[in-house]
Image: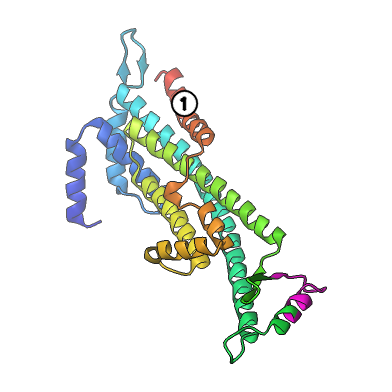
Amino acid sequence: MTKKHEKRVSKAIRETDSRKKCLLLVNSIADASLRGTPLLTRNQASDIEGSIRATAGFDSNGNYGPSDEQRTCVAMLDSLHLLALCLCDVQAESLDAKAELASLGGLFILVHEYQNFGEFLNELCWTRSGSYNARLQKRAVSISQLFPYSYNMSLVGEDDVRFIDLKLPNEGSSTIFEVIERVKQKSSVVKALIKAMRDDMSQKQIPISIIIEMIDDFEEGIRERIRLTKSILYRTDLEGWEELRATLANSENPKLAMMDALPDYDDLTVDESVYEQTGHSLNQKGLLSHIAETSIR
């Protein structure tokens, strides 16, 4: 921070109301903890702390205790503490969701490998006369069903035009849908945690910039990872998806069911139970608030 900027910030601190001073101090503490660099200089933070400390006084009963400004600052600090704990949950759930998406991406690659191998076998059976060699096709299918191969391979189509159809083993397909369900569940939890945090900061009017930036980054990270994982499966951009979708539907391609089972992040529902539980936790009074309520200075 330059000297000129420091003077401008110091002047703004002196002229602003106590609530904004508290919010600025809390944001500086959050930045120092989560980013490593505070918003305020040591002198600026000390000035705010001193001005808030000076508001303590006697109540109507003659007891010396914390002022409303001090209680407001304490409540903000408690909110910061609770939001930081919730942020740890968001980080853990985001990592779990990304791990499941990495696993799903590997399975989608396997789907493509099976498809490519099936196309390769069909090309081997294609003759110069413009038709498939039925004997070679039957031979390939019979060998594929022997141990240790045991491929899920068959001949499909009409009698005059048949081709080799190679699919994932049944257990492989079921595994894919199980992983998709876990991705959806983990992502819905992340979405619920983030929504609860945003709603809490909005309702209490305590916007903490670094936390807002971090939850935005977590959310965008999962949104992008889902998009990239889906692109592994359909190997086209979003603009070309509808055309490809129509082709897959006509051929009853199993990839279509996989695509439909994995929604985009923005289309996922919020885990309501996690949202309600998180909102309840964020509304609990913290230790500092309890101390402020019972202390007499």
**What residue do we see at 18% from left, 42% from top?**
12
Q: Which residue is drawn at 49% across and 66% down?
A: 234
Confirm whether residue 34 shows in the render: no
Looking at the image, which is closer to me, 144 or 160?
Answer: 160
Q: Is residue 281 above or below residue 104?
A: above
Quarter of the image with the N terminus in it: bottom left
Give the farthest residue toward the front: 160
Give yes or no for residue 171 being in the magenta stretch.
no
Residue at 51% across, 48% down: 187
Residue in the foreground of this view, choosing between 16 and 94:
94
Q: Position of residue 231 (x, y in %)?
A: 48, 65
Of residues 61 and 155, the one nearer the viewer is 155
Residue segment shown in magenta = 139-154
Residue 237 in the image, given as x and y percentages of width and height: 41, 67
* Residue 229 to residue 137: above or below: above
The location of residue 204, given as percent across then percent down, is: 35, 30
Figure quadrant of the C terminus: top left
Pointer 1 residue = 285
The residue sitting at 59% across, 92% down in the picture is: 128
